[in-house]
Image: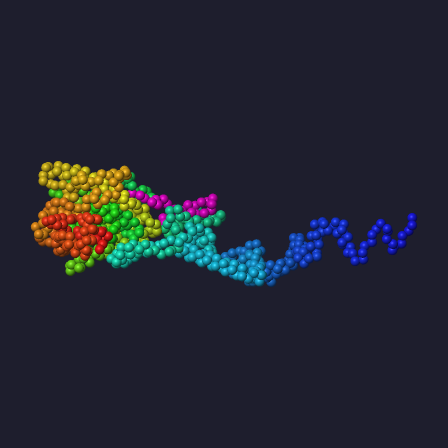
Amino acid sequence: MPSLALSETPAHITPLPAHTDPTAVLADGGVADNPAYGLVQWMFTTPVGFAFTVAVLIAGACLFDARVRKAIAPLWRLVTGGLVFVEPGAWDSTWSRPAPHRPENQPMFRGERVPRTRWAKSPGYFRMAVRWGLALYGWALYAAPWLTLTASITAVLFVAVHRAVRLAQDRVFNRTMATFAQGAAVLLDEEGDPRRWIATPKVRLTWLPIALDPRITRAARKISEGLEHKLGRLAIPVLRIPLENDDAEIRVSLDAGLINKNLVNELGRLGLARIPEGPWKPHHDEAGLVLKFKHPKRPPAEVLYDDDAFHQFPVTEVPIGKSAEGWETLPLAKLTPHIVMSATTGWCKTTTANVYAAHMLGNGARGFINDPKRIGFTAPFGNLPNVTIKTTADGWQETNFIFLAEMERRYELIEKYPEIKENPELYFEPWFMLNDERGSYVADLKDAWKAAEEKGLPITLRREKKILWQSRAALMFMADFAQQANLPVFIDSDGRDQRMGRIASGPQTRSAWTMMFPGTAKKSIPVKKGRAVLGIGVDSVKEIQLANITDKQARDYAIAGIAIAERESEARAKRLKELTEGGSASVPQGDTPASPDKIVPSVPGQSRDTGTQTPEAIPAQDDSSGISFSKPDNTADETANGGGTLPGNLTEIAGNSGQVNDQQGSGSVPQGDTGTDQLIVGMTDGAAFLNMTQEAFVKARKRRAIPGEMRSGIQPAWRKLDLNEWRSQAPRAGAN
């Protein structure tokens, strides 16, 4: 075998070029296709890979050697932005957790450090994220300035709004729950933000009505009725926790180590005393580690006056609303013959008055309504024969005069026949007088009295005091509705004490509450439409939801009462005749049955084809209620819509003496108070009296009949009072 020199290359081997890299030969052999080779190459040939390799090696060493961990710690803090030059203490934060809370009463040792700022108490990962986030933000400003600035402004606005909302919520929470939270923190040894362990309903934006002074509403009414209603709807936005809601719940988180039941009971007692919008009922959920405060059973959210209420209660038991236990009534024949309601505009004052009137009229009573607003009761009760509506001061004087005269006549019968006193409802038709907007009612009466150059308390208000003292035995009742219950509304404390049924709805001033419920701690009335406080007598105060009724429903019940009144009046006349053993006693005043052609048969709850009655279907109201007044110029004695005789006791009230005796003294009857003012005769004089053109007056009279119209020869004639009332109650009909 021939030998080869060392410099010789075998014939079957191709020599490599001089510039060829040896690693390329390995690549040609398939080593570079292995993923492990590529990873190793990245770890040792690139800067990022080399840094990663070093970090992995250091981390591995830290797992097994504490000395390595201690040596690497400063480098780690430097990289992550958490560089410190001293060893962390017991109260410092760590990488994963914030700094622990140190009790304030624990003494400090020399050299002991306690972080004070929020940043120092933050965990290490949070501080690292913030620092690297700032670095990233700086790079973004350099790379895409406009996009970064837009996003920055949006983020700043979002944070500002969120912070403002949070501050507002904190303020509302502190205003509502501060006293309870402070006491609970002492009992539970809690510190910091109480919202961490006290959960309440979410803060909401609500509209709080503005309670205006009654003088402002009266002035607005004189300018425009629409302005008064707009002022009544004024409200301000308020952030508040809706604790008054029936389903409101407050949750207090408890520590798992709290096993002292006495402490839990004391916390429950504290909540009952300090959490507003009570009452509350505490419940300890031991499994859930929470103490819950909920409202006990409360009145229903909505109450409707319906057929069941109409048939369930008699005329002297007016179902005014429901409490948590059920219907609450006004016992007119017992404790509360006279009632008063205090409620600002929009808080169901007129609706409650309609419920009162509908129940009374529907059960056969006779009603007199004095309405300074002029529009509140026309739709439900206008042009009904069992209701008299007056809207002027002269009309109120006449209504008051008729009411007092009837009361005196009934007392004469009671004195003559004492048996009547035991069951007056068997002999007398129930009468009621309803005064809406009591503040304006009193003010207008005083203005009219002053305009007549009279002094002292108006005679109408003096007569009213006598009615308050004596009318219950005569089955005659009074209801007043006011914006705010103050001294001018009641005239004096005696006028307040005679009204033992009291209702407060909506925002109430402290003085109004004291006037309504003297000696009773002020209750927080929920800011919820229809929710009110009812007081019966001197010490019974409870929360109710007022009943609601529509104008059409109220009118239906009032119409149904016409037939009921006719039937009961016949029975009363028979009993009175039997009582007098066939004497000359007449049917009690106001009980004269209405003629069949004046009655529209209807039963509440049943459908009728007639619907809402028109003035043509229902006769005009009987303004004189069967009492006649002498007419000048030899005019025949007759009333506006029927004849009658003047009761004997009217001689003392409106006779020759012209004096009214009461506790306030005596005063003369104002001119025109008994309807003896000069008649307006003819269309020309009628139009001139109302400051209208004759053509407009004729058209308006055709659209709506004038109650109390009579004849003087061949021409129509009216009392001044009747014309003023017609114009007041139908301003559109009297438009020029």
Q: Residue furthest right?
A: 1
Position in image of residue 535 (x %, y %): 28, 48
Residue under the point 10% across and 50% down? 631
The answer to which quarter of the image holds residue 461 is bottom left
- How many tags in the picture? 0
Residue 271 in the image: x percent, y percent? 40, 50
> Magenta span covers which residues?
278-305
* Quadrant showing the C terminus: bottom left
The answer to whether any part of residue 469 appears in the image is: no
Q: Residue 110 is drawn in which quadrant?
A: bottom right
In the rendered image, residue 226, in percent from the top left (x then y), is placed at 28, 55
Q: Is residue 348 visible?
A: yes
Residue visible at 20% across and 49% down in the picture: 702
Q: Any magenta on residue 65? A: no
> Residue 279 colored magenta?
yes
Residue 182 lies left or right of residue 432; in this view the side is: right
| Left or right of 249 on screen, residue 665 | left
Q: How is the image coloured?
A: rainbow
- Residue sitting farthest toward the front: 695
Front one among 696 and 390: 696
Residue 328: x %, y % from top left: 29, 44
Q: Residue at x 54, y 56 (%)?
A: 98
Does residue 494 sit above or below 614 in this rendering?
below
Q: Which of 335 and 236 is in front in this view?
A: 236
